[in-house]
Amino acid sequence: MTGVVRFRVLGEVAASAGGDRVTLGHARQRCVLAVLLVEANLVVTTDQLVDRVWGDRPPLRVRQVISNYVSRLRQRLPADGGVELQRRGGGYALLVEPGRVDLHHFRRLVHRARDEPDEHRALELLEQASALWSGDAFADIDVPWIAAVREGLSMERFTADADRIDLALRLGRYAGLLSELTARAAAHPLDERVAGQLMLARYHAGRPAEALAEFRRVRTRLAEELGVDPGPALRQLHHRVLNADPDLTATAPPPAPAVPWPRQLPPRPGPFSSREASLARLTEFLAGPSAPTGASPIAVVSGPGGIGKTWLALEWAHRHSGQFPDGHLFVDLRGFCADREGPMDPGVALRGFLDALGADPDRLPTEPHALAALFRSVTADRRLLVVLDNAADGEQVRALLPGGGRCAVLVTSRRRLAGLTTAHGAGRLHLDVLAGDESRALLARRLGSRARTEAAAVAELTASCGGFPLALGIIATRAQMHPDVPLTEFAAELRRLGLAALADDDPVASLPAVLSWSSHALSAGVRTVFRLLGTAPGPDIGLPAVAALTGLHPTEAGAALHTLEEASLLSQHPRGRYRMHELIRSHARSAAADPDPAAVRRLTDFYLRTAYTAERLLNPHALPIRLAPAVVRPHPVNDVGAALSWLDFEHANLLAVQQAAAEAGMHAVVWQLAWALVTFQTRRGHHREQAAVWRTALDAARHLPDPAARTVAHRRLGAAYVELDRHDEAVEHLHLAMELAQRHGNTGDEAHTQYQLAWAWGRRGADRRALDYAVRAVQLCRRADLPVWEADALNVAGRHATRLGDHDAARRHCDAALSLHRRHHNARGQANALLNLGEISRLAGHQTEAVHRFRAASTLYRDQEVTPAEADTADRLGHTRTTVDRVHAVWQEAF
């Protein structure tokens, strides 16, 4: 095989060199080559090859089959033949000069002819184009995609031949066309353009009667089969033939369009799942009444890789393709691809578009601005849909915007491209993950009955994929390829390997690869921030914590967060919170080779110190603990309201930080974080979480040298179990705390444990036993000079004296407690004492005094944001009112 390689597809698929025909393998291998030839010099992804060659029935290990075919094809291509078959961007590209493929050479000849002002030269070009055909295109291949291409090429050939015949008739070449036109009329009996050409040829060949007979034949067929009359152009030609018009030298029907309108949309995706609301939004942006009229409407679909942007865009484009009669343009701008070529130059895309719209490739301007201007001019009066997939940035898109206001532009990108909204009024749609029911529906459509019979495994797979369409698609594809493997095995693999279970040799079908393209597009500094965020514990994070984690100034940290949000690797939520999808977080963690100890220490120190500051504000009378030297500055919380607000937002993160510290063996931090959450968790009623953090803290305390750490951990865990009504466990831990406190002579801890035991037995209704513990707690607090704790113990003693019916003793205890709390400015302690005094007054029949006490307690609880106690006080107040209307009003206020 020597000389220049030329490919023929306008007949049977073949290659020749030096006049020698070369075999190209069996049918499927020829089909692979045919697809690559149709898309010469463009990347055809492996998925596209599978779809176009095998449809919905690919063989097992289809990617290996394609790889084998490509290897064989390469062996049949000479190294010096000017043809290369390369692996690119998750697919393959056949690099060849268009003139060496008869299909593309045909199209170039037709384009040049239509732009050629000299009709003799134009006719020569069209005759050369016609001579390239040797039968139906791809006559030796029978697959649905090739059949559709064959039909389109047949229309292109028909139109080009009609243009050639028009030129030949105008140039007086009548006799040589009669036989060809007779055959065309027989093949297309209802085509009025063919009928007009045949009438004109017969008329100038001296056969006017046959010309008139052709008109009658067409008129009869149109009436019988379509119920219509011939159009005005053919009727006018009939009139001129009937009257022997001497000026009759050209066909009356207008010439055909310069080129067939482009239909470049890739195949419709399927099965499409949900996203109906998103499709409706796109319709509002692109086809609704609010679309701007001065310029073509634009919609930008953004979101992380694998979220289904292209899927959505193509679904909308196919559903609405009929609204764009002048054609559909599509290009993959390669904004985020695995190879090193980088994003597509807009000039390359413009040349492809202009070529599809009929411009002569040899006459296109070289300057980018001139190309863009020509594209705007060509599209100014057309109704086109332009789909710009996988855009890198707004600048790349702006060069490809059509002219006028009749087109529509649909852009997909991993970036949000806010500039297109600012400068061009683009509608923006950011795709999020699928909801649980949408994910299950997607798997059900792909897996059929297996989704019902293995529902538990489907539920686990749905949860593990987190609504990521690509992840769900990968799992569904593997399950389809291995129908005998239970879905539980796929679920177990995903549970064991995480993101790594969604990897594939084909980067387009590999979620880790798709995500890596986004992270590789980041600058080195932002990539570092991204990796560190993947290691941050908790469901979300705020800017101050990010600054602590990264060691950056808040301004720099904020800029990095904005970049990550723009790249759809991070999403912003209310109050400046940022979140990562768990699969993206897993990718970020895997990209960080090892945790950065300095970053871990900074973030842990930030959370611990801020929580400690908040705890000191909420409970200033608690005995302080000693922290290690500061690494970073805490978030500023200056009052009780700010402390509660910060803790509300960071509570889940603080729990995660404690767990991470426990796994890292940071025992002191674990215990200190539990201590810093005591008052907040008590006020908010987070008793289950409080028990969990103190269980973890107790494990950590066993590694600490100070025995007081274990004492406090047992006592706090016992107190949490009291609130959860786990009495036996509560008492067990409280007695362990008592033994440790007594063994080490810690009167304060012993007093506090006696107080908690009083509380525990009081919850069981053992009021006498509870009173005894409370009285001992009062005595121990006085001995240790702990007045606020003494007041708390007095208040508990008063509560149980009340329940035992000793109202005088109860009042003495509670009055003393109120006095001590007021002296030491402990608002919550005052509220507790007032609540008990109100109850004593109510039981004694002093309703007015009770209402006064309850109101005062309610106000203090509300000011301190102690929600459960405030509700309890409101309930007691409602029961105390004597007027029915007032009772109703107070209960309304309580609820």
Image: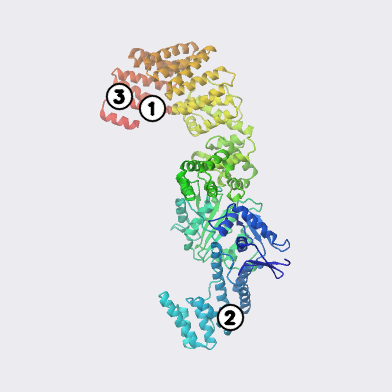
Q: Look at discs 2 and 1 and give the one toward the viewer.
A: 2
Q: CA distance from mark 2 to mark 1?
A: 97 Å
Q: Secondary structure at mark 3?
A: helix
Identify the residue under disc 1. 870
| Residue 818 visible | no
Which of the two discs, 3 and 2, sits closer to the camera?
A: 2
The amino acid beneath tag 3 is Thr
Tell me if mark 3 has few (under 14), some (14-19) or many (20+) residues whose alpha carbon lies within 10 angstroms of its own: many
Q: Residues within 10 Å of mark 1 (few under 14, many from 20)?
A: many
Disc 2 target residue? 168
Q: Amino acid at mark 2?
A: Ala
* Spatial CA span between label 3 and label 2: 107 Å
Residue plotted at (45% across, 23% down):
721
Q: Residue at x 60, y 32 (%)?
A: 600
Q: CA distance from mark 1 to mark 3?
A: 15 Å
799 up-or-down from 416: above or below: above
